[in-house]
Image (cartoon, helix red, strand yellow):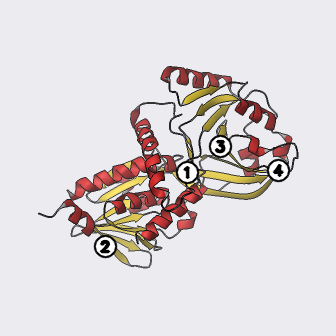
């Protein structure tokens, strides 16, 4: 009888989709000894490049169920993966802490209750006399911001992460193909992935990590999967105000649903994922900066130096993400909505376990 290792080394797995999830699956499976091919015609346009990399895990308020289990597992796995990936990029890290803020008194009361009930030393309430709150109130010319701080959550730079994963995958000689897969079918216990140029790629398994397009490759009716497009948007804003130093602010924080990352004294990034659409509206600046009752003058006068977006997918009628064995040798791992980077370690671990069981 062949050993499991021999089975792994001989098995060929095709991953359709080259975002964070696709590459993380390739990383996990490559470490197990599988031969992996990643297929994606638009690698630089996938939704991972619109991610800001905020890891909202420990501050997630629903501490039960599948979603929390995935977050909890990923929180534990991320430090191990960072340590592993630092061999390929010594600067890759999780910047901590992460701060969540609100101007809504009712929402703040819920944060207080959440922290009191969980008695987690990594979570604290930020009152008005906190240095973080003082600096944010001063910069944003307001008085009613309050919230919580998580010392366990933080941010991974998504561009740096993608580049590091690419470096690893190149080192491991992972195959990349830019063909667009338009059809998959099973024949004689093998999967045939057909490109638009009519090339056929044979594999023992296929993993669908290509967001909305994954539905085009399966029978959505029989598998009963529906995905909705959700727009993730971000912009970099230059400010011209001698009295404002953005570096006095926390490294990453969220105010009323908008993620904010100061890059330098006069430059910051603002982003969010909250629009059910495939194209940004004209008033991107207004939408992304409209998170306070009154905008500070420096933000109103700010100039967009860069803006970008990516289309994510959100499951309709079931929890996010979708992780399923559709049939023998076909797995779907997509529909991450806002949490692709956060959940990548736990989801790739699930995929790896499913595949190990398949070849056992």
Decide if residue 190 is on the left or right side of residue 117: left
Residue 202 circle label: 2
Q: Earlier in the sequence, mark 1 or mark 2?
A: 1
Q: Residues within 10 Å of mark 2 (few under 14, many from 20)?
A: some
Q: Quadrant of the N terminus?
A: bottom left
Mark 3 and mark 2 in contact? Answer it, CB < 8 Å: no
Residue 13 or 4: which is nearer the viewer?
A: 4
**Whole-percent x and y of residue 6?**
21, 66
User: For numbered disc 1, what is the local secondary structure?
Assistant: loop
What residue did someone put label 4 on?
Answer: 239
What residue did someone put label 3 on?
Answer: 252
Q: Earlier in the sequence, mark 1 or mark 3?
A: 1
Nearer to us of marks 3 and 2 is: 3
Nearer to us of marks 2 and 4 is: 4
User: For numbered disc 2, what is the local secondary structure?
Assistant: strand
User: For numbered disc 4, what is the local secondary structure?
Assistant: loop
Task: Report whether residue 316 is seen.
Answer: yes
Residue 137 circle label: none
Residue at the spot 88% in from the left edge and 46% down from the top edge: 242
Q: Earlier in the sequence, mark 2 or mark 4?
A: 2
What residue did someone put label 1 on?
Answer: 93
Mark 1 and mark 2 in contact? Answer it, CB < 8 Å: no
Distance of label 4 from label 1 (alpha carbons): 27 Å
**Whole-percent x and y of residue 222?**
33, 53
């Amino acid at each position: 009888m062949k050993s499991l290792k021999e089975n792994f080394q001989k098995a060929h797995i095709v991953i359709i989709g080259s975002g964070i999830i696709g590459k993380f699956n390739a990383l996990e499976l490559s470490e197990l000894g599988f031969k992996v091919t990643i297929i994606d015609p638009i690698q630089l346009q996938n939704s991972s490049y619109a991610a800001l990399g905020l890891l909202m895990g420990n501050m997630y308020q629903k501490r039960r169920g599948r979603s929390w289990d995935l977050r909890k597992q990923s929180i534990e796995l991320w430090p191990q993966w960072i340590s592993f990936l630092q061999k390929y990029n010594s600067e890759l890290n999780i910047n901590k802490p992460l701060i969540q803020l609100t101007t809504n008194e009712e929402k703040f009361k819920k944060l207080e209750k959440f922290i009191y009930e969980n008695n987690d030393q990594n979570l604290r309430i930020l009152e008005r006399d906190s240095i973080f709150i003082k600096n944010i109130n001063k910069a944003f010319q307001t008085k009613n911001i309050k919230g919580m701080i998580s010392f366990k959550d933080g941010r991974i730079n998504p561009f740096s992460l993608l580049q590091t994963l690419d470096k690893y995958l190149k080192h491991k000689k992972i195959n990349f193909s830019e063909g667009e897969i338009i059809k998959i079918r099973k024949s004689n216990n093998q999967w045939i992935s057909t490109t638009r140029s009519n090339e056929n790629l044979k594999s023992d398994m296929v993993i669908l990590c290509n967001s909305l397009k994954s539905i085009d490759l399966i029978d959505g009716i029989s598998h009963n999967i529906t995905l909705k497009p959700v727009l993730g948007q971000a912009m970099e804003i230059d400010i011209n105000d001698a009295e404002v130093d953005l570096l006095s602010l926390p490294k990453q924080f969220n105010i009323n649903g908008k993620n904010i990352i100061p890059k330098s004294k006069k430059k910051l990034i603002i982003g969010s994922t909250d629009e059910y659409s495939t194209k940004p509206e004209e008033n991107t600046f207004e939408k992304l900066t409209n998170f306070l009752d009154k905008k500070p003058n420096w933000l109103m006068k700010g100039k967009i130096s860069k803006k970008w977006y990516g289309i994510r997918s959100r499951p309709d009628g079931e929890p996010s993400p979708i992780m399923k064995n559709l049939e023998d040798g076909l797995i779907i791992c997509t529909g991450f909505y806002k949490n692709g980077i956060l959940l990548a370690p736990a989801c790739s671990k699930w995929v790896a376990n499913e595949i190990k069981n398949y070849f056992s």
